[in-house]
Image (spheres, grey):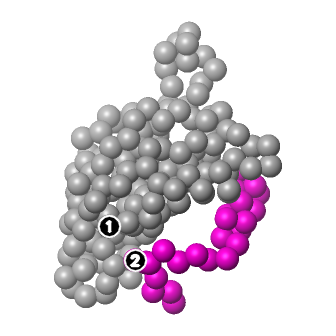
Amino acid sequence: GRTDCSNNTLVPNRADTLREIVDYLRPDIFVACEIQTKAGADSVLTRSFNVNGQTAYASAMYNFAGLNQGLNNQLYYNTTKLTLLYQDVIQASPRSIDHYVLYMNDPNLSSYFDTTFVEVYMCHLKAGSGSSEQNIRAQQAQELIDFIQVRPSDRHHIVCGDFNVYNSNEQAYQ
């Protein structure tokens, strides 16, 4: 496997590969982790999403929180279907969890003032198979659960990311 998480490794044709995937799937929401710089986040948007006449994609604000040590998360979304209401961070260690609140662009929104909210959580949990790392992952997962439990009950939640869970018996998985 690759061991370049902390290095700025250029993988040949990765923008082309992602562009092909996006072109085929046309995702309304796409999140990525290990985005190291704002320039990298912007490059993904302009080289893999808004290409070949496509202009509907936007990205959340790049958040270099410091805690994430260059292993930052980024949200991309289809603006014809969704609007990013706001974003914030759930403080967790060793890496924070990014939280994005989007709503559906309902054509009747201006008349009925009603829409569907989607909350996206992008996690990059602690790696490692030792008991210490497993305990850290469990704590990060619990912090996320505690946060979600106080959110409005009419929201839809998507939890995604690099969970670094090695088996289904781990407390973080449970």
Residue type marked 1:
Gln
* Left or right: residue 153 compared with residue 132: right
Q: Residue at x 71, y 68 (%)?
A: 17
Q: Quadrant of the C terminus?
A: bottom left
Q: Residue pushed farthest top?
A: 111
Image vertical order of residue 52 relative to residue 103, above or below: below
Q: Residue at x 20, y 76 (%)?
A: 135
> Where's residue 124, x and y in %?
37, 66
* Left or right: residue 83 compared with residue 66: right
Regarding mark 1 in the picture, which secondary structure is present there? loop
Image vertical order of residue 125 relative to residue 9, above or below: above
Image vertical order of residue 2 relative to residue 114, above or below: below
Q: Residues within 10 Å of mark 2 (few under 14, many from 20)?
A: few
- In the image, 55 versus 162, the foreground residue is 55
Q: Are marks 1 and 2 in contact (CB under 8 Å)?
A: yes
> Where's residue 54, x and y in %?
75, 43
Q: Which residues are magenta?
A: 1-26
- In the image, 34 versus 64, the foreground residue is 64
Q: Residue at x 39, y 66 (%)?
A: 71
Regarding mark 2 in the picture, which secondary structure is present there? loop
Number of marks in the image? 2
Q: Which mark is residue 69?
A: 1
Q: Disc 2 marks which residue?
A: 6
Residue type marked 2:
Ser
